Amino acid sequence: MTPQKTILRALAGEVLPTPPIWMMRQAGRYLPEYRATRAQAGDFLSLCYNSELAAEVTLQPIRRYGFDAAILFADILLLPQALGADLWFETGEGPRLSTITTAAELAAMKPADAIHDHLAPVYETLRILTRELPAETTLIGFAGAPWTVATYMIGGKGTPDQAPAHALKAENRAVFEGVIDLLTESTIHYLSAQIDAGAEVVKIFDSWAGSLKGQDFHDFAVEPARQITAALKAKYPHVPVIAFPRGAGTAYEGLHAAIGAECIAIDDGVTPEWAAAHVQTGGCVQGNLASSHMVTGGDTLVTETRRVVQAFSKGPHIFNLGHGITPDADPENVQLMIDTVRGA
Ligand code: CP3
């Protein structure tokens, strides 16, 4: 059966005259309606666990802009919380977690399949969205990749160079690999449950893949994503997977085959021309306009948007930013990007 939704068509390898479009962090602080709903929920985590309000903020950018995909509103750090880690957000600073660096702390985590009671509100958000989204909009579920989630669990917060996770990898390989394995297994359970609740596509966010080099990139970015994708394909052969190993650079080449994913999401650390020649040859790509254009706008936004569309026009492409939109972005620049992509 040929899929009708444009995102699913691109993921099936079709070259569309206009690329479908969505945007990482499309529900977020740059939108006044998001800030209002977050205030209503109380704080960010309360918003994530309030299914009605999480569905509402997921729908806000769809109503405002008519994006071709909606991404579940949640966070990659809900999974470690479901495994037993403490999680809180420091205002203006970002996430904080209880750390895991010893065998005893690893052993104290819950088993990989014991996450579902805690994450039930996330699954409910997806069920609401399957009823409320427009018929043409694709619903994307997601999880963090094991390495990226591990960097937060090991460091207890966001770390610019992921030094604590690299240190554990060097100093206590067994515990480090235990964390990666627990996250790989629990992510398979988590994404399976998201698909059961209505996600039509799943995306694996590996925001810090770029700090893994050589064999480490293979072992801890490619291999966990391959295992997750293979396990999902065994159960849900029809559900496309988007992998986003951000900062992979030249290692983006060959990743469709290495991971087994229908789509590789590309950041703006590589040019669209390079990615078209070296990555899109393997399948659908998503990306890769620099998110700074959503702040600066103007003629450069238009020129660079056209450049990305043009560079990827010979193969399957989903238009997106190279990373999430930032809170200081101007909502009007988002409209200008969409109008430019759609040729208005
Ligand atoms: O893309 C979407 O709109 C879907 C929802 C989503 C969020 N986070 C909401 C969010 C998704 C897919 C994520 C993924 C995520 N979360 C990643 C991977 C992608 C990336 O951006 O690199 C990471 C590393 C996290 C962890 C995380 N969550 C951090 C480091 C922060 C703080 C930084 C920040 O932007 O404030 C968050 C908070 C967060 N997650 C916000 C949103 C909308 C902002 C919270 C707020 O409203 O104050």
Image (spheres, rainbow, N blue to C red):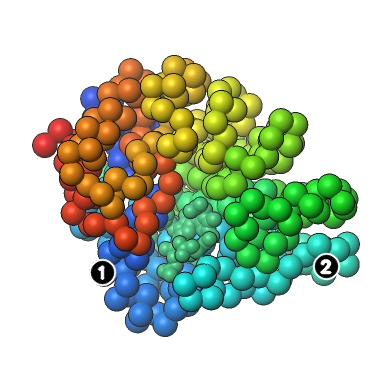
Residue at 46% across, 30% down: 270
The answer to whether residue 282 of the structure is visible from this angle is yes
Q: Where residue 235 appears, x then y in whole percent?
A: 61, 41
Q: Position of residue 3 (x, y in %)?
A: 35, 33
The residue lying at 17 percent from left, 38 percent from top is 299
Horizontal side of 211 relative to 325 (left or right) equals right
> Looking at the image, which is closer to me, 332 or 109?
332
Give residue 283's position: percent from left, percent from top. Answer: 47, 23
Where on the picture, by quarter, is residue 117? bottom right
In which quadrant will I find the N terminus?
top left
User: Viewer-proximal residue, 288 or 126?
Assistant: 288
The local secondary structure at tag 1 comes to helix
Read off the residue under disc 2: 105
Name which residue lies at 40% across and 80% down. 41
Name the residue tied to disc 1: 32
Residue 260, image x and y in percent? 59, 29
Instruction: Name the residue type under label 2.
Output: Glu
Tell me the SS state at disc 2.
Answer: helix
